[in-house]
Image: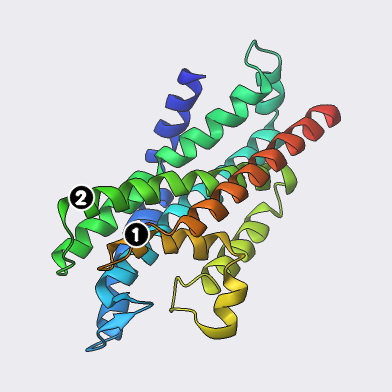
Amino acid sequence: MTTLVRLEITRTLRNRRYLLFTILYPALMYVFFVNAYGDADRAGGLPVKTYFMVSMATFGAVGSVLTGSAQRISLERASGWTRQLRLTALPGRAYTLAKVAAGAVTTLPAILVVFAVGAAQGVSLSAGQWAGLAAALWLGSFVFAALGVAFGYAAAPDSVQTVVMIAYMAMALFGGTWFPVSGTLESVARFNPVYLYNRLASFTQPGHSLDLAAVAGLAGFLVVFVAAAAALYRRDTRRA
């Protein structure tokens, strides 16, 4: 399993599309949003620069695991690679967990690069807040890594990219990635894992602590997505 995780991480980091769309693109979008908001002081209860630093870090992290994992698994199914792995001693749960773990590890560069740009833009957090925020966003990315695995087994190779992008953009649009959500939209957004993911930054506000409701919600989504990935993997095994 460790060898498979290492192989998956190496493959992802060598992918130029990964470097462009999940690391450089969110960092550039962060600079765009900060300048577009001009003199605005706060967004979503956070300073504008902090709010969009978090939202673009989560945008890159979610994009990394959703598009990367889903497309790779779907192509592996089509090429017969997954079928070959089933003939080895590697159990199905180890294969699935390896995909989730490898996907989550590759979110770190997307998060850290946006954080570096945020710091250069003047985001001011204590050392503990920087470390806590990085840890929270990295751990939260496991939720979307599991969803990416589920998508990889659910969609056909010729439609997986479309399915993933529609789901990805819808969650980002209504999850506070592009703009703060409020009112009726916010009450609906509470059922959106991307919104809960962005809420993990709330503890950086003075007088606030970690949003435990968001943590609980993400934990629930993680259980659902892992269960879905396992069920879809078993279905794919029966078909093979």
Quadrant hosting residue 41: bottom left
Mark seen at residue 193: none
Left or right: 27, with 55 as reference point? left
Image quadrant of residue 217?
A: bottom right
> Residue 125 is drawn in which quadrant?
bottom left
- Viewer-nearest of labels 2 and 1? 1
Name the one closer to the observer, 132 or 62. 132
Whichever of callouts 2 and 1 sits on the residue coming sooner in the sequence is 2
Say which residue label 2 marks: 128
Of all residues, the one furthest to the bottom in this rendering is 39
Q: Which residue: 47% across, 58% down?
A: 197
* Residue farthest top in this picture: 89
Q: Is residue 14 above or below residue 132?
A: above
> Can the viewer see residue 58 in this picture?
yes
Query: x, y (%) of residue 133?
Result: 31, 53
> Is residue 14 visible in this depiction of the protein?
no
Q: Amino acid at mark 1?
A: Ser
Task: Assess disc 1: are there few (<14), some (14-19) or many (≥20) residues with their C-alpha within 10 Å of its C-alpha.
Answer: few
Residue 150: x, y in percent?
67, 44
Q: Which residue is mark 1?
A: 209
Image coords of residue 97 (percent x, y): 57, 30
Circles 2 and 1: CB atoms closer than 8 Å = no
> Which residue is pictured at 70% across the width and 28% down the height?
80
Q: Position of residue 10 (x, y in %)?
A: 40, 31
Count of marks, rendered view = 2
What secondary structure is marked by label 1? Answer: loop
Reply above or below: 109 against 181.
above
